[in-house]
Image (cartoon, helix red, strand yellow):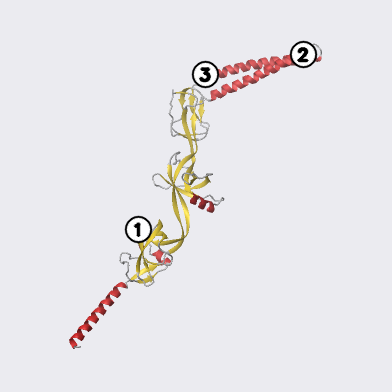
Amino acid sequence: MNKTILFALLSLIIVFTSCKKKKKSEALETYLVANPMIIDTTYPSEYVAEIQSLKNVEIRSRTTGYIEKQYVDEGKIVLEGQVLFSISSKLYQHSLQSAQSALRSALAESKSAEIEFENAKKLMEKNIISKTEMELMKSRFEAVSAKVDEMNSQVSEAERFLSFTQVRAPFSGIINRIPNKNGSLVEEGTLLTSISDNSEMLVYFNVSENVYLDYVETKNSSKPKEISMVLANNEEYPYKGFIETVEGEFDKSTGNIAFRARFPNPDLLLKHGSSGKILIENKLKKALVIPQKSTFEIQDNTYAFVLDSENVVRMKRIIPKLRMQNLFIVESGITANDRFIVEGVQLVKDGDVVAPKIISSTELLKSLPN
């Protein structure tokens, strides 16, 4: 082999070796690598809620007549026993007066019959009248006494009907819509208004059987489970509530069961019939967690770069179970023993060989954005 050919071969070997070293140097770039964290955490679940007053009742007329006066306005707070409406009462006052007059007459007649009966007993003892005459006097007295009882009943009935003309609040609360105003003719059963006791609110929401069973397992009777609520404007209600009771059976059509929670309402912000979302904190033990910054998406699928035993980069699809602040709770696709690239996922590709720099869970948490 001549010197020219030998020189050419040596040159090619040097160039090839130089290129190979360069490629190897580029491939072995250092990346931060970590194992997925395993933590105990909590996460909120949302449930559509129906908000009801502690008490909400319709107030209906119990008599017939014209509304003489309306004492309250819609949306106003009233106290238990406060007069809300007056319904024309002259007819019932007349009935009461008639019943009272009849009672006075019956009382007078009863007094007279009583005196006659007492005299008859004395006369019979002296053998002036027979026992039969005395029994007749006794029967007359008992009949008149029964009449007095009847008249008392009629007076009470008249007083009761007269009281119906003064419509009072059954409890303290807020007056709702008033469809009939002053001068309106109302009959027995006519809706006058409704009243709501909003001092506390009852909130109903439905949960699945799994959630129900989890609740039963963690239930502590000495300390009711505290929950939060988000209102229709997506603002969180400032007061916490607690689960009070659970219905007795599941809805066969949905497989859900209803919970009832109680919330304080000192500012009277909540109203009967409004809606919201209940937030319940659920415990999750030994959750597998990786940073969101260590993942990327392709066509709505989530991936992470994982290193094999030869430090070769492999793209793995993961299934997130929950999204937390800066973190994914992983349902499947990656294990606790896998090593994933923490930062720089946009700089590597499947098949690259890298130089890993292992960091601990503590260092991994410090690397997350605040």
- Kindly identify the amino acid type of the residue bearing the numbered disc 1: Asn
**Which residue is label 3 attached to?**
91
Crowding near the residue tagged with mark 1, few <14, some 14–19, many ≥20 C-alpha atoms within 10 Å: few
Crowding near the residue tagged with mark 2, few <14, some 14–19, many ≥20 C-alpha atoms within 10 Å: few
Q: Specify the quadrant of the image occupied by residue 2.
A: bottom left
Which residue of the protein is positioned furthest toward the left in this rendering?
4
Q: Nearer the viewer, mark 1 or mark 2?
A: 1
Q: Specify the quadrant of the image occupied by residue 348.
A: bottom left
- Kindly identify the amino acid type of the residue bearing the numbered disc 2: Thr
Q: How many marks?
A: 3
**Which residue is label 1 attached to?**
301
Crowding near the residue tagged with mark 3, few <14, some 14–19, many ≥20 C-alpha atoms within 10 Å: few
- Kindly identify the amino acid type of the residue bearing the numbered disc 3: Leu
| SS at badge 3 | helix
For the N terminus, the quadrant is: bottom left
Of pointers 2 and 3, the one earlier in the residue sequence? 3
